[in-house]
Amino acid sequence: MLGKFIVFEGGEGSGKTTQIKLLQQKLETAGFSVLTTREPGGTNCPIAEKIRQLLKDPTNKEMKPAAEFFLFLASRNQHVEQIVKPAVSAGQIVISDRYFGSSFAYQHFGRGLFDLQTMKNINALAINGAVPDLTILLDIEPTSGLTRVESGANRNNLKDDRFDAEQLEFHEKVRNGYLTLAKTEPNWQVFDANQPPEKLHEQIWAQVQKML
């Protein structure tokens, strides 16, 4: 049996980590084999993880938008070919914290890079057909999300992450970009991330059951 590929998208502080953990537990309890991973980088994918370090490093302030995008694509291709595709082919459910939706939201809508169709065409080369069966967008106002990040006990200071440290205007563009994508991209579902975690998890689980 072929597996499934589920992606969680959302701005900073939207609660992706919590919801991924809850969904993983639910799926494993139901008898599924689950692999959780992330972008940039990836579980058991050291090459992609090294690229992640470059992208996240707050000292890399001179990184150009196009260079940033191409680094994401390099990490993504390695991640997809080495980890995601083999796991799905083996019958596992792969859950990724971010995927190409983040590139479109952050680099195109946030940074104004290229036109969207150009980004989609280039990204298609990197993913080589690995389209998610379900993309879960956790929507939250940037001010609320960034407050969560700043107050989170297990999160680094905002200044320790190049993306967290961006101005509020940037994060608002990212959010609007995500909502625009959700209207046109296949298999996207939007959820209100302001809800209590358990209630949000129940809504996500109901959608995952439909997909399964």
Image: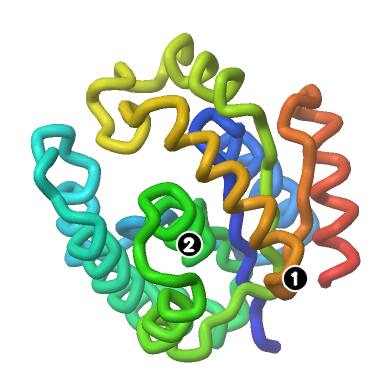
Residue 4 appears at what percent x and percent y?
A: 66, 75
**Residue indicated by mark 2:** 104
Q: For the C terminus, which image quadrant?
A: bottom right
Instruction: Using the rendered image of the protein, determine whether residue 49 is visible from the camera's viewpoint.
Output: no
Residue 28 appears at what percent x and percent y?
A: 69, 55
Nearer to us in this view, 181 or 31:
181
Q: Is residue 130 rendered to the left or right of residue 165? A: right
- Separation (CA) of disc 2 from disc 1: 16 Å
Nearer to us in this view, 80 or 148:
148
Identify the residue at image location x=64%, y=28%.
Answer: 141
Q: For the N terminus, which image quadrant?
A: bottom right
Amino acid at circle 2: Phe
Q: Is residue 59 rendered to the left or right of residue 86? A: left
Nearer to us in this view, 3 or 153:
153
The reply to whether the C-beta atoms of the residues labelled 2 and 1 are less than 8 Å apart is no
Nearer to us in this view, 188 or 85:
188
In terms of image quadrants, where is residue 107?
bottom left
- Neighbours of disc 2 within 10 Å: few (<14), some (14-19), many (20+): many
Amino acid at circle 1: Asn
In terms of image quadrants, where is residue 164?
top left
- Dot 1: element: loop
The colour scheme of the drawn protein is rainbow
Identify the residue at image location x=60%, y=33%.
Answer: 14
- Neighbours of disc 1 within 10 Å: few (<14), some (14-19), many (20+): some
**Residue indicated by mark 1:** 187
Identify the residue at image location x=65%, y=79%.
Answer: 3
- Dot 2: element: helix
Counting residues from the start of the chain, the first of labels 2 and 1 encountered is 2
- Circle 2 or circle 1, nearest the eye: 2
